[in-house]
Amino acid sequence: MKNKYLYIETFGCQMNVHDSGQMAVLLRDLGYEPTDDSAKADCILINTCSIREKAEQKAMSELGRLMKLKEKNPNLIVGFAGCLAQHLGARVHGRVKNVDLVFGTHNIHRLPEMMARVQKERKPVTEVGFSSSLHSLGIFAPPPKGAVGAFVSIMQGCDNYCAYCVVPFLRGPEMSREPKDIVGEIEKLAGRGIREVTLLGQNVNSYGKKTGGRGDFVFLLKKINDIEGIERIRFTTSHPRDLSEELISCFGSLRKLCRHIHLPVQSGSSRILKRMNRGYTAEEYLEKVARLRRVCPEISITSDIIVGFPGETQKDYQETIDMMEKIRFDSVFSFKYSERKGTAAQAIEGKVPETEKKLRLREVQALQDRHTQEKNTSLEGSVQEVLVEGQSRNSRQDMTGRTSSWKIVNFEGRSELIGRTVPVRISRGYLHSLRGKQITP
């Protein structure tokens, strides 16, 4: 029997990467082997993101490019998945002809069934309905051979309705998995050599609020902390409004919880935060950062910032700059405000000119580069515990891994170190990584 090959292209966040892994597992059971060569594929899936307009444009452009392969091979099955598929639904078929399959964020578990329909009926299939269950989140995706870390989805959806965000419309209402199911999945991962897990959710801080008292996020972290074989626990993303005192205290009490938190601030202006419907003030955010650093002085804090939100004055923007100077984040993902259809921000007056948004973004990024370089330089001479993930992309003699605080470290070493946590003395701090030397007994 001729081998069948699957090519998946993923856009967007860690959650999409995890979703793509689940799709690959489901199609592997149908005989599809993964390939990095789209021209070789019998099935192509594009897993999309719709958070920003640029991501949408890139996904549609890539779909158009890959559809040219279908002109050469009419038997090729092309599927369009993820948030943008959820948003556009059947309209994808109108924008790009001959797409076989369009499915949304709640229908991953139905992929084998949808593939069978396409193959039998040779008609386009569209499935973008929301489900009241968590079937898709429960698909176990075995890690690749030699992997050290893995993603684990603990919930899906969001109830926050930030004014700029489409996620509640594309991922649906917030639902949490049962703690025992999550623990069971992580135990299986540990048995396959995984040493670090990253818990995924639109707002992990609100995990468990709808499970009838069967455990909140702190309860879940403590359960995972007890799993033999797991050395490190990470999570993303945290909403500042729901960052409780109990969760903050975990950074001082849970040995396996990494000394890093991604805490999106979005703006340093309380007036703009109110317009964004974020549910906290700039002062409250600053106080939570201060409490995190009191509990765990070495914690690394990363964030997201949006510039040019409707109504953002020069004063509002300067307050964001001032906050960055006060906090000095380890790194920041920064973006120009991108209007998304259906969000509350569409109706807010005071649109910021594109030229001004670009200027503000350049300034934010330049300031953050200085702060990141300062942070990394300050680690020179220190000894960091590095979980070795694999060979460096830049040198065959080097290994690469991360510190508990999410810093990339490259050092000379051998492949036997993969999966081990080793002490490395940092010799040089660069903008995007650290250089060091392994300390041997």
Image (cartoon, rainbow, N blue to C red):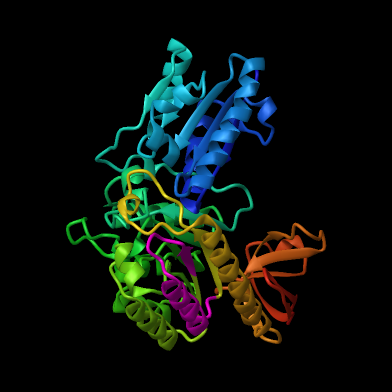
Vertical side of 49 occupied by 207: above or below: below
Is residue 195 something that shows in the picture?
A: no
From the viewer's perspective, tell me whether residue 306 is left or right of residue 39. left
Give me the residue at 69% from left, 32% from top.
37
- Out of 106 and 349, give the one closest to the viewer: 349
Vertical side of 112 occupied by 179: above or below: below
Is residue 184 something that shows in the picture?
A: yes
Residue 326 is a magenta residue: yes
x then y, percent, for residue 228: 46, 65
x then y, percent, for residue 115: 46, 22
- Out of 315 and 342, give the one closest to the viewer: 315
x then y, percent, for residue 78: 54, 25
Give me the residue at 46% from left, 63% from top.
306
Specify start and end residues of the magenta stretch as a single range: 303-329
Q: How many marks?
A: 0
Identify the image quadrant of the N terminus. Answer: top right
